[in-house]
Amino acid sequence: MKDKHVLALIKVANVLREIKVDLPLTQLHVLLTVIREEGLSARDIEKRVGQPKSSVTRNIRVLTERASAERKGLGLCEYRCDTADIRVKNIYLTEEGKQIARKLEEVLDRAYL
């Protein structure tokens, strides 16, 4: 792997650490998928990341306001009802999630200039 790619990954990890977001790779993969394409359903995310449905559901919950009944989530994503089918909930970034996306984009832009 080229040094600039490794450096970029290290910088991304540092940004996430600075803002107190300690994500396992599976959750980071889901977050990056939502950053890349907001408005996906859990099923769409499942297809893109190649994780089982239960894992994707759990990872999305951790990224939202409430990971479980007892545990607070990270508040980076939120569910919104699909406009075409109210039974479907799509995943979007919250303002905090958008701020993180912008920081990551800045770091990567600088790494590849």
Image (cartoon, rainbow, N blue to C red):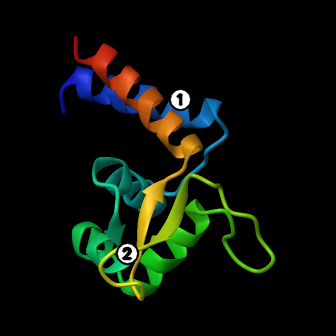
Q: Quadrant of the C terminus?
A: top left
From the viewer's side, name the closer residue of 7 and 77: 77
Please tell me which of labels 1 and 2 falls first in the chain: 1
The residue under the point 31% across, 70% down is: 45
Q: Does residue 25 appear in this view?
A: no
Going by the numbered disc 2, the residue's amino acid type is: Asp
State the residue position of label 1: 14
From the viewer's side, name the closer residue of 35 and 109: 35
**Distance of label 1 from label 2 (alpha carbons):** 35 Å
Label 2 residue SS = loop
In screen coordinates, is 47 left or right of 76? left
The residue under the point 53% across, 29% down is: 14
Residue that sits furthest to the left in the current view: 2
Q: Quadrant of the N terminus?
A: top left
Quarter assignment of residue 47? bottom left
Asked if residue 53 is positioned above or below residue 51 in the image, the reply reads below
Going by the numbered disc 1, the residue's amino acid type is: Asn
